[in-house]
Every structure is written in C-alpha cells, then in structure tokens.
Amino acid sequence: MDKTPRPRFSRAPAVVAGALLAALGVGLPTSAASQSLRGSTASLDRQNRMAKEHAYTFIDEGDRVRYFASQGWLVRIEPNSDFALKGVSYPYARPEVALFVQRLGSQYRAACGEPLVVTSLTRPLTGQPVNASDRSVHPTGMALDLRTPRTRVCRSWLEGVLLSLERGGVIEATLERFPVHYHVAVYPRQYASYVAALQTRGGTTATKSVTTMAEREAYTVRRGDSLWAIARNHGTTVDELRNRNRLAGSQIYVGQVLNLPVGS
C-alpha cells in the first residue's frame, strides 16, 4: 500500500448497482460521510493489530512463502471462470482469503458478467513495491489487491460490497492511487465466522441462491480427504476435478480450495 492520501470514490452508486446489492442481501453504506475507501493511519493500525492477534508472521522471502504453503498455512489460489490472477508473483494466501476470493468472484461475475481480477496476494518483504508501506500486511498472506472495474456500475457494485463488509468488521478496504486498485485486508477469524453465520441463517431467497452457488463452486480440503472421496460426495468425477483445478495428478493438501462444477 502506498503512503499518499487516498481520494474518496464517487458517492452516488448507480441505481442498477443498488438493485444488484439488494438482490445479494448486501446493504449499501448508510451515509457517504461515515463510509469511504480512504486509507488512513488508523486503518493500517487495525490491519497490523489483526495480524498480531492472529500471530501471523511477516514473511521475508519468496522461499518462505512456498514453505508456508507446503505446511498448509497458505493455500494456492487457482483462477476459474469467476476470477483471474494478473501479475501475481506468489499465488498463495490464507485459507480465508481464498474463500473471500471465491465468494466475491462468484457474486461479482453474477452481477457484472465478467471475472473479478486479482492483481496481488501474498508478497514477501523482499518483494514489496517501492511505494509500499513498511506496515503493509501483504507479507502475512491476509491481504489481496483487486483491479478496479472498467464500468461505473461495476465499480459502484464492488465498492458497495467492500464497504458493507468493512462496516461489518470482517475486512479493511482501501482505494489506492498509484496504481489505482483496491487493497483488501481480510480478517480471517472474523470473515470465517461471518460466512458460517450466513450459512446458518440462510438469509433471503436471493441471498440463498447466490450463497449456494458460491459454496457449490468452492470446497476447502480437510484432513483425510482424497480427490476420489470429494468427487463422490459432490456428484462429479476425479477427471472433472483435475481439469477444473488444473491438477497434474491426484495429490491435494489440507486447506487447499478446490473449484467444483456448478450444480454438483
């Protein structure tokens, strides 16, 4: 994240974006004065405090990123039809970040008809850009960057969702200027609890349909799982899972997020 002051984004979401948010069960900000994507020292403080509460390591080098992944502390993020990775040097993140990308990507594609674009995930300290804050949480694996949508309607939709989640205390989102993008720090325990509550509560019919679609397309590997068992339990085949997740073989690891065929 850069250290320069951040601008406020347009404070009048399009009517279409509002309708899309309502259909997803996501509330728009109550007032433009109380909600913005402007970064601040307080925002950095909250992100760093959350990283410390989770006892996260600020990873120093690329080899350590891969080591964390080998231990299951980070998971590999595999793109699908809902989201793409562009310019991502280390496609790894905390499991909850993977869940966030899966869910947001599915909802964004349903709302805008195009994939969400992720431009950065875990970055080691030695791989941070020159304008990054020395307090950035990218080296912990709990942050990601998103490309700004091309259309005003989709920008308004995405900003409304990010602000709603920030207001709920599960993420911290900032509109960065150089280059322009959204920086999102996901609070792992808080976000996992939020998703669990959504699944338990069920929500409105519209929210159920979107949540069900997102959950059908994502499965987090648990201890004792195998591709064969996952395929059997979700009504698909091992070959289909391999193809959809670009797997060369049958090896999977705990915490890995697999994309499942829609409707499985």
Image: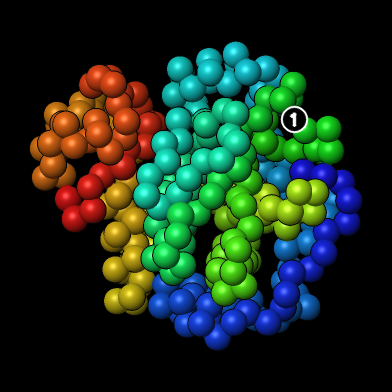
Q: Which quarter of the picture shows residue 256? A: top left
Q: Which residue shows up at 24% across the image and 31% down it?
A: 242
Q: Is residue 91 above or below residue 41?
A: above
Answer yes or no: is residue 141 visible: no
Q: Which residue is mark 1?
A: 128
Q: Which quarter of the picture shows residue 198? A: bottom left
Q: Which residue shows up at 58% across the image and 34% down it?
A: 88
Q: Quadrant of the N terminus?
A: top right
- Please count the marks in the image: 1
Which percent across, then down, holds residue 108?
46, 62
Which percent across, then down, holds residue 217?
30, 49
Q: Is residue 86 above or below residue 26?
A: above
Q: How is the image coloured?
A: rainbow
Report the front residue among 174 and 129. 129
Residue at the limit of the structure toward the front, as seen here: 150
Q: Which residue shows up at 16% across the image and 31% down it?
A: 238
Q: Which quarter of the picture shows residue 249? A: top left
Answer yes or no: is residue 143 visible: yes
Which percent across, then down, holds residue 172?
66, 54
Q: Viewed as shown, does residue 80 lie left or right of 182?
A: left
Residue type at the position of mark 1: Gln
